[in-house]
Structure formats: C-alpha cells, structure tokens
C-alpha cells in the first residue's frame, strides 16, 4: 500500500523546472494586465498554482521575477525589431509598408506588455533598488533604441534628416498609449488592431511628410524675401 502511495506521489510530481515556468507564465499574464506595484507575489503564486515561498526560492524577489518574465522578452523584441530594420529597402515608395511594419510591430509589443507600460509611467514611485532589480534602466535604453529607429526611418524614407529624438520618442509614447489605454479612449471597446495601426501610420507618416514640406516652404519663402 505504501509502495502504491509513493508511486502515485511520484507520478503527480511536477517535472523539474515546471514551477519556474508556471511562475513566469503567471507573472507575464498578470503584469500584462496591471503594473508592478499592483501585482502581488501571492497573486502570482496563486495564478501559477504553487506556494508563495516557492516564488522566492526560484527568483529571490518579485523584482527579479518581473525582470525575467517581462523585461527580458521586451528587450529581445526591441533587438529583433532593430535587426529586421536592415531588411527594408530605402525609398519614398516604401514609406507605407515601412511605417506599417514598424508601427504595427511596436503596437503589438506594447499590447502584449501593457503592464510594463503602466509600470514605466509609475516608475517614479519605485525605489532605486527596485528600478535596478526590475531592469527599468534597461527598458529606458531600449526606448532610446526605438527612438533611434525613428531617425533611421527618416533616412530610409528619404524625407530629409532632422533632429529626430523628440519626434521619435513622442511616436513611441503615442503607440504605447494606444496599446495600453485604447479601450478606455474608445468607451471600453478596443478597435480592431489593423484600424489602430492604420491610424498610427497615417498620423505619423503624413505628419512627418507635411512638416518636412512646411519647413521647406518656409525656407523657400525666406530665400525669396532675401532676393527681393
């Protein structure tokens, strides 16, 4: 009888590494819905179906789990997006496809990491230790890289090189906002993904192009005044 009980326990025992995977999956699910501070270790453990002390044995802290479950995948997506940038063919004729590819990927990334967006916007409430352990500093570096992609986009689209950091970061912020809060902005019903991406493409692409034309026009007017 005792032998049967032991074999039953062995059969139902989780495979090595399973609790860690379950905790990471649970953390990703919860952090995708709410920010870092609002998510508790008890909540993560209950969602994973494991005891809370196991979370600390596996990761040491909630911040370390956040880093592995949310920050590391986010950084990988940004790195992949940067790598894919090299595949685009330059030229104004590719502007629509280029903008849709980039902004669509950016939107999808933020939709899958809405809790990360909210955590970034409430990061001032985190301690220095939490900022370091969660990897928020690394996220800032990734956002800076996304900003650099905006400058590369200007080169690829051949619309003229200009200081792009503020424009690019504002684009990233707009996409992140739409991904994190668009259901609120639209009365609780999130519009279809393709409709949102299309609006982002039109707003960003034509906004840059029109501003470029406006700046050129102003310069031309000034030159004309000088000749007069």
Image: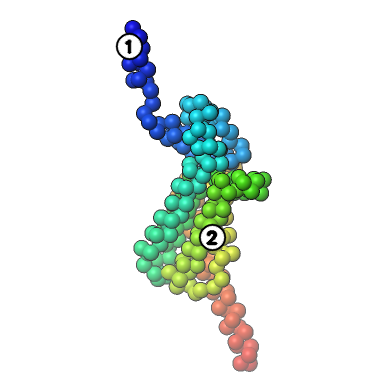
Q: Residue at x 50, y 64 (%)?
A: 148
For the point 50% across and 33% down, the residue is 57
| Residue at x 56% of width, y 46% of height | 133
Question: How was this image coloured?
Answer: rainbow
Where is the C terminus found, in terms of image quarters? Answer: bottom right
Instruction: Classify mark 1: helix, strand or loop.
Output: helix
The answer for how far apart the CA atoms under marks 1 and 2 are is 60 Å
Q: Is residue 131 above or below residue 4?
A: below
Q: Describe residue 124's horizontal placement relative to residue 107 as left or right.
A: right
Comparing labels 1 and 2, the label whose residue is closer to the camera: 1
Q: Residues within 10 Å of mark 2 (few under 14, many from 20)?
A: some
Q: Earlier in the sequence, mark 1 or mark 2?
A: 1
Residue 8 image offset from top left, x and y in percent: 35, 15
> Any mark on residue 144, and which?
2
Q: Position of residue 173 (x, y in %)?
A: 57, 55
The furthest residue to the bottom: 228
Which residue appears farthest toward the top when viewing the image? 1
- State the mark number for residue 20: none
Nearest the camera: 33 or 135? 135
Density class for disc 1 (Cα within 10 Å; few <14, some 14-19, many ≥20) is: few
The quadrant of the picture occupied by the N terminus is: top left
Viewer can see residue 3: yes
Q: Is residue 189 visible?
A: no
> Which residue was labeled with disc 1?
3
């Amino acid at each position: 009888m005792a032998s049967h009980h032991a074999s039953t326990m062995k059969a139902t025992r989780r495979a090595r590494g399973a609790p860690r995977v379950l905790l990471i999956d649970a953390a990703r699910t919860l952090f995708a819905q709410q920010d870092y501070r609002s998510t508790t270790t008890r909540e993560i453990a209950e969602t994973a179906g494991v005891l809370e002390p196991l979370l600390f044995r596996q990761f040491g802290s909630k911040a370390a789990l956040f880093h592995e479950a949310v920050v590391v995948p986010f950084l990988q997506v940004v790195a992949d997006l940067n790598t894919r940038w090299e595949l685009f063919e330059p030229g104004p004729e590719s502007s629509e496809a280029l903008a849709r590819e980039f902004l669509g990927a950016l939107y999808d990334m933020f939709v899958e990491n809405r809790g990360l967006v909210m955590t970034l916007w409430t990061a001032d409430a985190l301690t220095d230790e939490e900022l370091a352990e969660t990897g928020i500093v690394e996220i800032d570096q990734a956002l800076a890289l996304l900003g650099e992609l905006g400058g590369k986009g200007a080169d690829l689209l051949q619309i003229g090189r200009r200081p792009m950091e503020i424009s690019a970061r504002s684009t990233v912020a707009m996409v992140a906002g739409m991904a994190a809060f668009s259901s609120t902005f639209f009365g609780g019903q999130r519009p279809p993904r393709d409709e949102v991406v299309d609006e982002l493409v039109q707003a960003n692409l034509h906004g840059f192009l029109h501003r470029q034309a406006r700046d050129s026009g102003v310069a031309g007017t000034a030159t004309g005044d000088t000749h007069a």
